[in-house]
Structure formats: C-alpha cells, structure tokens
C-alpha cells in the first residue's frame, strides 16, 4: 500500500483512470452486468480509502503526530529531541534544553512496545556479530560507528535491523533520514544496553524493588540532608514600647556522600562461531549476564561489606550456590557496598532470637532506629527457610492469600503481622552461625532484618554499559557488562536503622 502523500495522490489518479476505462468498456458491452457491479464496488471502496488516507496525510503534514497514537506517540515524544534529531544513545550533550543531555536514547532504554523491542534486539545482535566476526575492522577509526560496507556483509543480521527499523513510526524514520541523509537505510550506533535495564527487571521476590533508586551523574555526589527541624513557637502580639524579639531556631543540616562502585561480569564468545549461531545464542548470553548482575546486586544488598576484613568468610562462601566459592580477594562482588546485615552488625543492633515469639518480634520492630513510618514501609525480611520454620503458625500472622483488597508491596511478600510485610528472599541465607555471619563451621542458622525502607536508597550511576572486545590471543570476543551501583543509609549517624535477629533455626 502507498505510504506517502505523493504515493496516495498517484494511487488516486490511477484509480480514477481505471474507473474511466471501466466505464468505456461498459459502454462497449465488453463486460456482463455482474462483473460491472463487482468492479464498480471495488473502485468505490478504493476511492473511499484514498480520500481517508489523503485527509490523514494532509493532517500529518501539519502535525506529524496527528495520525499516530499510543506507544508510537510515546516513542516520538521521547526520542525525537527538541532540535528535531533522533537520538539513539543518550547522555551525549551538555545542553540542558535537549532530552539527550540526561535521558537514555532509542537503543539504550527499556522498550516501549514490541516494535521497539525488536529494533533493540536486532541492533544488538548486529553489534555482537560485527565484533565477533570482524573485530576492529567493523568500526570507524574512532570506534564509535560502523563501517557500513563491512557490516552489510552480515546480511541476515543487517536485514533484520532494516526490517525492524521499517516498523518504527514514520516521524522517527523521517527525522532520521533528514539528519543523516541515509535514504531510508538505518545504520545504528554500536550499542549493547539491554542487559543493564534487564538487571532491574530480574527481581523474582521484589527485594530490589523495596528500595527506591537515585541516579547520579558522577562517581560520587554530595547530598544535603536535614538533621533537625526548626522549633515552632506560639506567636503573640507586640506590647509596650520595647517588645520581645521573636524566638529563633535553626535547621540542622548535614551531607551524605552517595557513591556508586563498579560491578561487572564478563563472558567469552568464540570466534569460530558462525554468525547464525551467535545471533541464536545471543538472547541466552544477554539474559545470563543480566541475571548474574541482578543476583550479585541482590546478594550484596543483604550480605555486602566494605570492611578490610569482610564480616563473612567469603573466600569459601558459595552464597546460595549461585556462583561457586571463589577466593578473589578485593574484587569479590560482596565488597561492592555495605549491605543490611553489615549495617546492623556495625551498629551493634543484632539480637539472639533462638527463642522467637510475637513479643520478641514486636521488640525488634521497636528497636529500629531513626524516623518511623507506617507498618507497610517497615518490612520484615527473612529467608524462605526462616519464614517456614519461625513465622508460619505464629500468632497474628496473616497470609498473603487472606489480604483481600490490599496488594502486597513485593512479589516475595508471603504474609504480614500488625501491618508489617514479611518478605521471604534468597538474599538472606540459611547457612549462618550463631552471631549471624558465615564462618563455614556452624552453617544451620538464619535470621531476619527489619528496617524503614524509606530511609535507604539504591544508588545508580548513569551510563551503565556493555562492551565487546575482540582478543586474538584467546580466539574470541569478550563481552563485559558493567554497572555502577551503591546502597545508602539515609538516616543520621547513631540511629541504628536496621535491626538484625540472628541464631534462628532452619
């Protein structure tokens, strides 16, 4: 079918010509009555379609968004910048008036619809094939763009990109053609970003989602915070010739330093793999990388420690059996930032709960320092083993199945007590000792933590990336996914914001 206004105009003229020819044939008696009626009906339908499309084309000439809606409109509004340019990567300008100064681009963000997802997957598959099959030869001298003559040779991956691009909304394709003069051909930016947003998607028990995130633009940022409210006073009218001055107070202020440290994973793709097999295997590789980083982030939120000597014997600790026991010293992922257990232990806010009851649970809730919140914002986070052994059957426990209209705050919320959600997560392990750490000797204890989740933030550094590097010495290509993350206790010093119950049976 025609696509542009000019094509529709030509189609209308062609239809009118055919109608005239039909009329002439009717006059000559060359068609019977049934054929005449059928053909006339088809022509009438075509003319109605032409009139409608011409009207929409005219509207679009004045407003490119007039004939698109829903998620296609979202794509255009988010990725056609204020200067009319389509941006693929984002965070590439210092001009605050441009979206691309502080936003991810078309190929570097979570997909809005299926067409957008297909484009991202196609361009990333092309990137992997280009690096694995051609190395540096696939890119320009700066390494920031493709050499089109090289990547076009990977016909299957290249054609898949062009097909996916053809499904993008017309305003985006026109804007791209206008800025690049590409004549309808789409040459993407070499970019591999989907594992980064997929990390945030992989959160089976909702543990990550308990904490809001802050995105910072540099390695560390100082955040001003208040430490005390100004004192309120009762006002009074002035009296006499020398009235008393109004009482004054000050706002207590301090600053927090938000930091984001690198966490990465790296895999090898062998160079003798064919382009077809690379494309086929890429979704599995990408998902594996995403899940690895997500699991590392989740485990570090609970078990991380930045002390010179980690609280746990991490060299021999195969946490939940996910990654094996690796003695890698200072680069262990559980050293990226301080997690909830370490925060509580450093504040001496742990307690022996080998004897566990409703009374001791309420005592632990009251032991959470800092600003209080509604019960739904003060979750009790334990292991699956700990929940089954110590909470099921406890007086006052309400199963999530009996909530009625109240929605759980997290996927892993299995129950609540006095309005406090109980979250069962594998981030809390069941192989700890009697003081709540892993020592490899006593490995049959678990615990729980209680906190005000509004007083904690996950810190993310903008511009997380996935890089590919061809290495002839190993006959393959390394794929490295790197995110910069942190975890910040926003409460003031001395508040003891996490209560940690230890020595619980499994």
Image (spheres, rainbow, N blue to C red):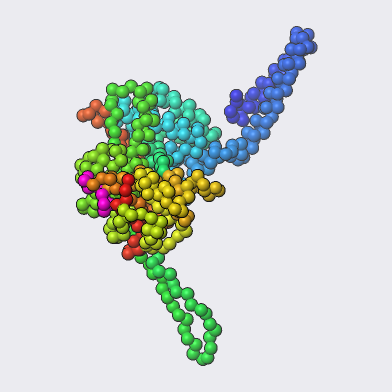
Magenta-drawn stretch contains 497? no
Residue range highlighted in magenta = 433-441
Front residue (pair 218, 206) = 206
- Residue 201 in view: yes
Magenta-drawn stretch contains 434? yes
Main SS of residues in magenta: loop
Give the image quarter of residue 67.
top right
Image height check: is 383 above or below 121?
below
Q: Position of residue 305 (x, y in %)?
A: 27, 51
Quarter of the image for the C terminus: give it.
Answer: top left
Front residue (pair 197, 93) = 197
Number of marks present in the image shown: 0
Q: Position of residue 422 (x, y in %)?
A: 42, 50
Front residue (pair 29, 234) = 234
Residue at left offset 29%, top offset 54% = 342
Q: Position of residue 357 (x, y in %)?
A: 38, 55
Residue at left offset 41%, top offset 41% = 204
Q: Position of residue 356 (x, y in %)?
A: 36, 54
Quarter of the image for the N terminus: give it.
Answer: top right
């Amino acid at each position: 079918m025609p696509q542009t206004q000019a094509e529709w105009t030509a189609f209308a003229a062609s239809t009118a010509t055919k109608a005239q020819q039909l009329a002439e044939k009717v006059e000559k008696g060359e068609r019977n009555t049934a054929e005449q009626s059928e053909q006339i009906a088809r022509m009438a339908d075509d003319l109605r379609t032409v009139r409608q499309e011409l009207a929409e084309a005219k509207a679009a000439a004045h407003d490119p968004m007039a004939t698109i809606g829903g998620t296609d409109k979202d794509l255009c509004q988010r990725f056609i910048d204020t200067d009319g340019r389509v941006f693929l990567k984002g965070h590439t300008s210092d001009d605050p008036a441009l979206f691309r100064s502080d936003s991810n681009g078309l190929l570097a963000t979570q997909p809005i619809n299926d067409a957008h997802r297909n484009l991202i997957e196609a361009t990333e598959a092309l990137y992997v094939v280009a690096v694995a099959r051609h190395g540096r030869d696939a890119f320009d001298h700066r390494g920031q763009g493709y050499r089109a003559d090289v990547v076009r040779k990977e016909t299957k991956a290249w054609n898949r990109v062009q097909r996916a691009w053809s499904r993008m909304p017309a305003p985006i394709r026109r804007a791209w053609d206008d800025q690049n003069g590409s004549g309808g051909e789409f040459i993407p930016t070499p970019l591999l970003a989907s594992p980064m947003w997929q990390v945030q998607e992989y959160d089976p028990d909702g543990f990550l989602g308990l904490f809001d995130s802050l995105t910072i633009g540099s390695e560390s940022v100082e955040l001003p915070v208040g430490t005390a409210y100004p004192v309120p006073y009762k006002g009074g009218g002035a009296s006499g010739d020398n009235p008393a001055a109004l009482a004054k107070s000050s706002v207590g202020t301090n600053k927090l330093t938000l930091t984001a440290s690198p966490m990465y994973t790296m895999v090898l793709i062998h160079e003798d793999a064919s382009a077809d097999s690379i494309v086929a295997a890429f979704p599995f590789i990408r998902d594996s990388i995403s899940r690895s980083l997500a699991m590392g982030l989740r485990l570090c939120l609970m078990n991380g420690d930045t002390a010179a000597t980690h609280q746990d014997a991490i060299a021999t600790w195969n946490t939940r059996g996910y990654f094996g026991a690796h003695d890698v010293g200072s680069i262990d992922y559980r050293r990226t930032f301080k997690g909830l257990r370490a925060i509580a232990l450093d504040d001496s806010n742990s307690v022996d709960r080998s004897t566990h009851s409703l009374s001791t649970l309420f005592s632990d809730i009251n032991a959470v320092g800092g600003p209080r919140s509604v019960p739904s914002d003060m979750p009790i986070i334990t292991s699956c083993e700990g929940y089954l052994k110590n909470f099921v059957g406890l007086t006052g426990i309400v199963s999530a199945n009996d909530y009625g209209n109240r929605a759980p705050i997290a996927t892993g919320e299995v129950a609540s007590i006095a309005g406090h959600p109980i979250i069962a997560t594998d981030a809390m392990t069941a192989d700890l000792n009697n003081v709540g750490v892993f020592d490899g000797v006593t490995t049959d204890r678990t615990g729980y933590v209680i906190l005000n989740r509004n007083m904690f933030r996950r810190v993310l550094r903008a511009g997380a990336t996935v890089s590919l590097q061809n290495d002839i010495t190993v006959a393959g290509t390394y794929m490295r996914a790197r995110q910069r993350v942190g975890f910040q206790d926003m409460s003031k010093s001395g508040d003891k914001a996490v209560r940690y119950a230890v020595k619980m049976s499994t």
